[in-house]
Each structure stands twice: as structure tokens, then as C-alpha cells.
Image (cartoon, rainbow, N blue to C red):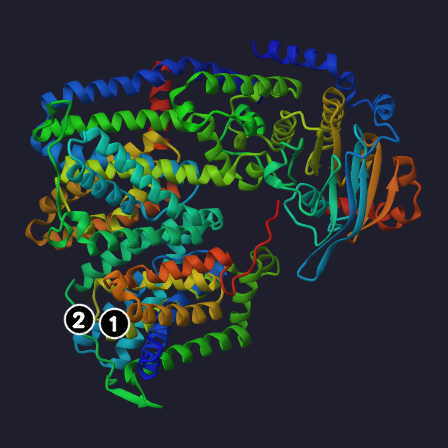
Amino acid sequence: MIADFDYQFFLEVLTGGLLSGVMYSLVAIGFVLIYKTSGVLNFAQGALLLFAALTFVSLVERGMPFALALAVTFAVMVALGIGIERAVLRPLTNKPPITLFMATLGLSYIIEGAAQLIWGTQVHGLELGIEDVPLEVGGVLVSQFDIFAAAVAAAMVLLLSLFFRYTRIGLSFRAVADDQFAALAVGLRLPLIWAGVWAAAGLVALVAGLLWGARLGVQFSLSLVVLKALPVLVLGGFDSILGAIVGGLLIGASEKLAEVYIGDYFGGGIESWFAYVVALVFLLIRPSGLFGQKLVERV
Amino acid sequence: MSAITTDLSATELSKGANLSSWLAPLIVVAFAYIVVPLIGGSYLFEAILLPFLALSLAGVGLNILTGYAGQVSLGSAAFMAAGAFAAYNFNLRVEGLPLVASIVLSGIVAAAIGIVFGLPSLRLRGFYLAVSTLAAQFFVQWALTKFSWFSNDSASGVIDAPKLCIAGFEFDGAVGRYLFALTVVVILTFLAYRLVSSQTGRNFIAIRDNEIAARIIGIPVLRTKLLAFAISSFIIGVAGVIWAFAYLRTVEPAGFDLDRSFQILFIIIIGGLASIRGAFLGAALIVVFPLALSRLGNFLLGDVFDSGVLDMSQRIVLGALIILFLILEPDGLVALWDRVRRRLLLAWQSS
Amino acid sequence: MPISSHAFGAIEASVYAPEIFAQGLPAAPRQAHEEPRQLAAEDAAPLLSLEGIGLSFGGVIALAEVDLSVRPGEIRAIIGPNGAGKSSLINVISGVYRADRGHVRLNGARYAQVPTQRLARLGVARTFQNLALFKGLNVLDNVASGIAYRTRSNFAGQILGIGRSRREQADQRGRADQILEFLHLTGVRDRLAGTLPYGLQKRVELARALVAEPRLLLLDEPMAGMTAGEKSEMAAYVRAARDRFATTVVLIEHDVGVVMGLSDRIAVLDYGRKIADGTPDEIRNDQRVIDAYLGVASENEEGAGI
């Protein structure tokens, strides 16, 4: 068994897994943004992603130039994010987190329905102009598209960290994340900040939607990538961007490796639940995830 | 002091209402057994009452776990599937096993699976637990599709329901299947009602409302949580049997997907958490509103309103309903119902 | 009908606890606790003792080398400014926190962490700083849940309503009713706990803790957020509870005035350390306490306790 272990092949699978893990991270980051600042687990993130990709594709298909379509979609996403904050989350301020979660579940139904009602249910191809020819890096074949996606994700994370560290509004995001009441007391305007966060989540949804859409085609099932992001969040902690990245890589890699090396023992198709089992087993050992804050119970 | 005085009179009122609190369900059950079969057509049974009964029971089951014990589950459909396929296999593979035994055993199988996937609840809370119940959803659906043994090697895991025969009496046709489903639902709902008003039910609520306080006053938190998972899964499993055997007659694992789990969750949110009646009100709304929407859409928009549009507008309306209830009536239809009834009662008393 | 039952409750209680009538009379409480002090025999073995307790959260020291001994039958107060570690101490005693150093001796048994799940069986009950009632249960069931740990019937028996489960339920509710009467809560017996005013909720918590007739009762700021009138009322209830059930009481409180009149002995915490320990008179005259706490008490009380 060990003797005929194909090291080259293993590396290829691992790399492929890590790169698809980056795609998971990209979705998960959208969750973290909102969870960190408002304590809402936004199940509608997947629906937002679908909405963004569908809007963009439909605009391009109707003859709008690429850059303009991108700008318009971005504007739509920001408006949508702010609208959601206004119409759904503000009336539910101070409700238990699980109520907010269920509200976002309802929201995802609305957005999914609306996206398809407006743009139709057919599958759209999405061409970002990146050739999907495998590249050879150090003797390992890697998809060019995956590298591009990883680079975009990395740029995005970098951008977000810079934003959080150096801009005024970014700093107020962090203040709100740390302590809502204190932030309120020093005069930060929470509604404005939440609107900002939802707009940022809209941007993340747009980027993730385009990358995922280019890979899978833009269709209803795009909103299901949220189900790939959830185990990543459980693993990395709902409130840690770093956790979302590391968690995504771990889930991506272990999922691919498991599918290739032990999938046959289960008759294949285990990727629908394997990530959840990995996350669960991990959680049973470390209940607060990789980087999540350990909560001290206050009584 | 005045608060206390007014409250005592409220107590007196509720004691007086005690009789009517038994009378009302009795009347409803009697109506369902005697009048409905006489006046109902097959559309009423096939398209409304049978799915209503199955989903109500699933709602009762999920309400025990989520509404009473406070453990959010997104995997209800998995337990329905487990129940349905277990009953199918018991019936198929154990010669001469009475149907009732198959149903009870299938509930037990669902309960066992519920305990396994409830184990994370011992260490996880809130979102972490909710996400981990998705594991049950995906795992069970995958296993039922992957291993064709569960469906007796039929194509894509489809199973056909056996004849519904209890003690030589065959529940045939739409009315027969309705009476069969009604009987199972009435029995289990009665037991569920007894449970939630027992010490165990109060322990569920205690853990939901304040887990640390519950632990400190000596309520066995871990055992009680697992019990909630087991009982809830048992009931949802039997609801799955009704769904498969009495309502659809032919089911496949794909019918118990994540959307079904959400549907059951929506039922208890709309109906009212921690309320047995709420599950029935919520299920009624969930079953009736798509039918009403489709009628309405056809009437207003004609041909434009095709099945695709219907599907999408259903999603939108359903999502909007959830959000509206969460914002305007967080205690669900039950609270609405009680308020209306109280107002009518007052109006009646004062006139 | 309501009025008579309320009056009946008061008369009942007075038989056990004459001090109940003394509430509001400033001189009476001091008189009343001359007698219980003999109850708390000076040289009896301690019911509870903490030995060298240390606790820190991520570098912040909450408790350092705290020793404390509590004699059977006494009312033992722990006071200190905000953040002095009082609540942490109660949480260590009840096993919610595990101390980094030291141990807790309870009834002679030594624990590094007191087993929370078995606390009730060890004869310990507690209340919480923030209300910890079960909002979805009525007052009676909240109180009855305090003895739910004695339930031996299982869920199936309870569903079917067979003999034992019925007897248990009747017995538990009966006991709960007695406590409700004792604490003058009978009038709100059937109300949902979450709908009661704050002061009454605090009293229901006391009832839930008392129903198990604990040997040791831990009260975490039982009078926080109350008006002066409610505070002296609560103090009278605490004393009455001690006298009726021979319960030892450990209580945390901000309001120094109430504590002085209520307690047999007082320990003072400041920045996680015990800086004084003694009778109310000793504490009143202790220079370190005056410096650390009493000197700023009037400022402190503005924002504290809420």
C-alpha cells in the first residue's frame, strides 16, 4: 500500500483541495463580516451570491459592457444590503440570535425567488476571460482558474484587513464587533455601520458569486454553496476571518483527499456530508472552533 | 397589590376555562372523525388533509425539540426519511409483522438516529448545533440514496407503500388513509401533550430558558437533551411514515431534502414555538397557502402565472411570511388566535 | 377571596418568623438576630470552607488566595466594590467556575471543582445575580423545579400518569405551594415567571432555591436593583428562611447598610483579595475596609448594583 503510494498524485489532489477551499473561504468571509458586527448568522449569504451572479450575467447578456455591469451589480448589491438591514434586521434589533437567523432564512427564500422571477430560471454561462488550462507548478498540475480565484480571494482578504485596520469606518466596525453598547455610548452610529457591513457583505457576495458562477454556471444551485461555507464557519469560528480562511483550506483539502482516498469505501458521493462530519468531530474536541473566542459563561 | 388581585381573578377564569380546554380539542377530533369523511371530496383528502396531518405531526415533533427544549434542528426531514424507510423495510423484511409494530419500530429507529445526531448538543449550542444538525440531513439522505438495500434495490431509491392494514381492517382509498393518519396523529399528539405538561416537559423548558440554572438545581441536563432529541425524532419519524404510507404512497429520499426540513421549521415558527396547537395552525397555513396562491395567481394573471412563476412567488411569499411573523407576531398564529378569541369572548360577555 | 388568602399567608408565616413583622422597623432586625447567633455556634466545624482559592481569566486576576469559612446556621455576607470578585467566588463555590488554585471544602469533602450537576443533592442551592428564572414556566412550576432533581419517575410514566409520577408531582407542587405561602407569593402562583415585576422575580428565585430546603444557600446579589423598601423586605425573608429551615446563608451584596443589619459575619473583597473578615461591628471599624470600600460607598452606590 505504502510502496505504490503516488506522491505526485497526492500533491495534485491536495493542491486542488486547497484551492477549492479558498473558494469556500470566500463565501465564509461574507458570513463572518456580518456575524462579527451584528451577531447575525446570515443564511441569506448564499442567496445574495446567487442574486449578484444572476444580475451580472443577465446584464452582460443584454449587451452591457463588462465593467459597467460590474459597477451596476455592485450598486444593486449595496442597495440590497442596506435595504435588508433597514427592512428586516432593524425591526428585529435585540431579538435572540436564533430569531435573526430564522429571519435570514426567510430572507434567502425571498431573494432566491425574486432573483429567478426577475432573471428567469435557465442556466447561464459566465465567462470571466480566464482560460482553464492546467498549469504545471513544480511538477504539479494546477488549474489556472483556481489560481486566479485564490489570488482574488487573497486580494479580497488583504483589502478587508486594510480596511478594518486603517479606515475610520473600518475601525468603528471593529468597535461595534467588540462591544455594541460601548460603541453606542461613544457615539458611533450603529445603523450606519450595519448598513456599511451589509454593503460590504454584498461586495463579498458579488465576488464570490462571479467566481463560483464561472465555475458552476449561474443557476439556482449557486445559492447552495452556503451549505459548503457552514462547516467552514463551524470549524473556524463564526467571528474570525482568519478562521474562515484556515477552515476553508482544511475543509477543502480534507474533502478532496477523502473523496479520492476513502470515498470508494463508501460508494462515493461523500462530499455532501464529509465536511460536516470533519467540522463536528473537530468541534467535539474544541467547542469554540479554531480561532473563535472562548466564551466565559456569565451568570 | 392590585396586580396580585387582578391576577387571581385571571386564575379563576382559567380554572373555569379548564373544561373548555378539553372540550375544544374533543369537538375538533369528533368533527374530524365523523363529519369530515362525510362531506370531504378526494381533493380535500389527497391535497390538503393528508399532507396537513403528516406535517402537523412533524411540527409537533420538532416543537418538542426546538420550541420546548430550545435545541434548533435543521435536519427534521432526515428523521422523516429515516422513519419512512425504516417502516418500509420492517414491513418488507419481517414476515407477518403487524403494521402498528412496523410504525413503532420505525419511530424507535428514528429516535436512535436522533440520539446519535443529538450527541453534539451536549457540547454545542445555538448556531453550532443548528449547523451540526445539517450533518444529519445530508448524511441520511446520502445513505438512503447510496445504498439501494434501503429501497429494496429499486431505481433511484423509490419505495412504494404497503397496504395499510390493521387487525384485518384495511384503510383503503383516500378516506381510509385519512382515518389511518388521523388516528396516528391524534394518539401521538395526545401523548405529546401529556409529555410537555409533565415534569419532563418542564425540564425541557427549564433547559431552554436557562441551562446553567437548570444544571445547578439538579435537572439532568445531558440526559434531558438527549431525551428531547429521541422523543422528537420518534414523532418526526412516524410523521415520515404517514407522509410516505398515507399521503404520497410512493416516495424517494430526494423528497426529504433540506427544503422539507426548513418547511417544518417554518411551520413551528409561523404556528408558534412551544405550542402543540401551533404546529397544527402552522401546518394548515403552509399546506393551504400555496394552493390558494396558485388559484389567486391564475385568477389574476392567467397564463403568465405558470408553474415556474408559481414556484418562485411561493418562495417569496413564504419568506416574507416568516419575516413578518418574526417581526409582528413572534409567538405565531397561536398568539393571534388566542387574542382574537379573547376579544370575541369579551365582546360576547359585554353584550 | 384574594385578600383573605393573602392575609392567611401572612399569619402562617408569622408563626415561623416573627421578624417578618419587623420589616420596616429599623431597630427590630438587630434584636432579632441576637438569638440566631447562638445557633451559629462559634466553634462548630465549618459547613463550607474555601482554601487558597485563585482564579484568573486570560491574565486578569479575579480571585487571589481567598480563604473563607462558613459556620452552620450563620448568615455570611461577602461584600466589595464592583469587580472585586464577589460573583466569581459564588461561581467557584457552586462549581460554575473551576478555580485555578485551591479547593472548596463542603461538608468535609474536598473539591477542586464542585460538581454542579450534583450540587442540589449536596444540599446547596443558589440564586443568580441576573434573573435566572425559567420564563416559560409559571411561578409554581419554577419553584417546583427546585426539587425536580428528586424525581424518580421516567417520562413514559409521566405521560401515562401512573401512580408514582402523580404522587411525585402532587408532592413537589405541595412543597412549592408551602414555600410560595411562606414568601407571600401565593397570589402570583399561576403567573408566567417572566411577566412578574423585577422584585417579585427575585423573590421567586429565592423560593426556587429554598424549596429544596438546602443546608447551604448562596445568594448572588439578592437585593440588586431593588428599592429600599424591597431590600428590607428581602432581608427579612432571608432571615426568616434561615430561621425556619436552619439554612446556612452566604450572600453577596452591594448595599453595605442592609448587609450590616442582616449578617452574622462579613468578608470584604477588594481586587480579588480578602482584605477583612469579621462581625459587622469589626468591619465597620476596619480602616482598610473604610479606605477600600466604605469610603467610596456613597459614590459607588450611584452606579453599582444595576
- Kindly identify which numbered label has been placed on residue A124: 2
In the image, taking residue C228 as reference, residue B327 lies left or right, namely: left
Could you say where residue C140 lies in the image, as x and y percent from the top left? 54, 23
As displayed, is residue B59 above or below residue C142?
below
Give the quadrant of the C terminus of chain C.
top right
The chain under label 2 reads: A
Whole-percent x, y for residue B301 in the image: 10, 49
Q: Residue at x 13, y 51 (%)?
A: B153
User: Is C27 situated above or below C107?
Assistant: above
Q: The numbered mark 1 sits on a residue in which chain?
A: A
Q: Which residue is mark 1?
A: A213
Tell me if residue A59 comes above or below residue B282 in the rendering. below
Look at the image and tell me in which quarter the N terminus of chain C lies: top right
Amino acid type indicated by mark 2: His
Q: Can residue B77 be seen?
A: yes
In front of the other: B298 or C29: C29
Which residue is painted at 50% across and 38% down in the image? B207
The amino acid pointed to by label 1 is Gly
- Look at the numbered discs 1 and 2 and tell me whether their residues touch, using CB distance below 8 Å: yes
Q: Residues within 10 Å of mark 2 (few under 14, many from 20)?
A: some
Instruction: Tell which of B275 and B317 is nearer to you.
Output: B275
From the viewer's perspective, tell me whether residue B21 is left or right of residue C238. Answer: left
